[in-house]
Amino acid sequence: MAAAPMSFAFTLLAACISVLHHAPAAAAAAAPANQTAGFLDCLAASLPAGVVYTHASRSYQSVLESSIRNLLFDTPATPTPVAVVEATDASHVQAAVRCGVGHGVPVRSRSGGHDYEGLSYRSLDAARAFAVVDMAGGALRAIRVDVRGRTAWVGSGATLGEVYYAIANKTSRLGFPGSVGPTVGAGGFLSGGGFGLMLRKHGLASDHVLDATMVDAKGRLLDRAAMGEDLFWAIRGGGGGNFGIVLSLKLRLVPVPATVTVFTVHRSRNQSATDLLTKWQRVAPSLPSDAFLRVVVQNQNAQFESMYLGTRAGLVAAMADAFPELNVTASDCIEMTWIQSVLYFAFYGTGKPPEMLLDRGTGRPDRYFKAKSDYVQEPMPSQVWETTWSWLLKDGAGLLILDPYGGEMACVAPAATPFPHRQALYNIQYYGFWSESGAAAAEKHMDWIRGMYREMEPYVSKNPRGAYVNYRDLDLGVNDDGGVARARYEKATVWGRAYFKANFERLAAVKAKVDPDNYFKNEQSIPPLPS
């Protein structure tokens, strides 16, 4: 696929889709007929007409596909939910959960559909019924901005693009440190911590969650005071689909200057890109916190992308001082407002209308993709980058996205929230994508990304090898419903510690307290800590 990296890089900082060899061979999820029928009858009796879509509904397929972002999970072989509840009110979610608990049918929540493994709307087990609560409508998508209080209440079903648009529609001097991808659902993004272009100045998006409302496994509607601080800690980075269904979140907005500056410069392999990448590892995490400099590495090119909370002169001076080898000039830099910078990185170009942020990107996806992630604690030697260029020439090659940490990220204790990777130099996302259908094409691209991941093993974090939960990866392991609780928990620690390190046990303890029967579950959900 010949698309330039800028045309799709925004999708990658989102949150979450992926593994072909896990895909089951049966179509719709099956279950004992009386169990499923009782659940559907309960939904019909508890919810208004037009909210519930079953396989018998004419619009079922279009509703299900409305937030599917990966063609891997839109096939006849993918187990599908017995019902999709298009919830527009908290009471709809409560009713779906109560019906599900009463009839033994788990529900999964979906806000934007960017889960990298599709677990917000699909299952790997065709033998077990499940349902989806989609929160992309009504009150669960509402956004209320309080400029004076510098806060916003955001429905989980709102997209980040809608959040940015709502803020900018009220004021030009406040923003939010979210992802680059405008179609990412706010609920899923914040559940995994969430980072973006202002992470070095303002940390994770979830660091700015002040309150939340959620439905627990008993169908109760809880706010921060009612859920308690342990559960409130867990939902701000502990991953989606674990503890309940978060309906809305109160966010602290952050100040943004009247002028921000961006640049995108390309340096090829034969323009010293290897040396630049080698030095970037030390420079980017130690720049002034107003400066963010990430890299997209594809083909034989390194694309350096920067967003600076200040003027052109300030960015040029910062680069000249810390990274003169990159040779950034004033002509490379563009001054704009914060909301214009959001549009610039989302759609790569200037002059885009803010209304583009309101496009939720619904409709059938146009590509297959697979992603993996790593954290780097020590700079890699230059020969590693030389080897990487060779990998990027292979058939089926994808790209790498390097996001630097440091700044505010490094000032927060790893146990302050479930997200533990605060001290890393940077995050790597390995991203493979293709448009050709068929097993041969999928195998070629999957082989590349898994091979690239193996190649990097000696140079990334260890014991455990870290991963970002919003780039969910089932290659790390899946849950096992069989056996004793202790064995199930131990198996889950393999992937759980990659995402959460020492915080995994505390997350499991919270799970045991608030959902001891493990109602909210998926293939990589937090299991209850055995007593």
Image: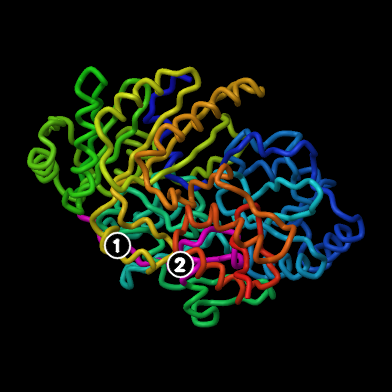
Rendering coords of residue 501 (x, y %): 45, 59
At 53% from the left edge and 60% from the top edge, which residue is drawn?
A: 156
Q: What residue sits 11% from the left and 46% below the top?
A: 314
Verify whether residue 219 appears in magenta: no
The spot of residue 190 in percent (x, y) is 46, 59
342 vs 130, nearest the viewer:
130
Percent coordinates x, y for residue 498 in the rendering: 48, 52
Q: How far is the residue under mark 1 from the one under mark 2? A: 14 Å
Residue 161: in sight, yes or no? no
Which residue is more in the foreground, 510 or 377?
A: 377
Q: In which quarter of the view is residue 382 placed?
A: top left
Dot 2 corresponds to which residue? 153
Q: Could you tell whether 282 is left or right of 100 in the image?
A: left
254 in magenta: yes
Q: Secondary structure at mark 2?
A: strand
Using a 10 Å C-alpha cutoff, classify the residue at mark 1 as few (fewer than 14 neighbours), some (14 to 19) or many (20 or more). Answer: some
Which numbered disc covers residue 254? 1
User: Could you tell me which residue is drawn at 32 percent across and 68 percent down?
Assistant: 150
- Mark 2 surroundings within 10 Å by alpha-carbon count, few (fewer than 14), some (14 through 19), many (20 or more): many
Per the image, label 1 sits on a secondary structure element best described as strand
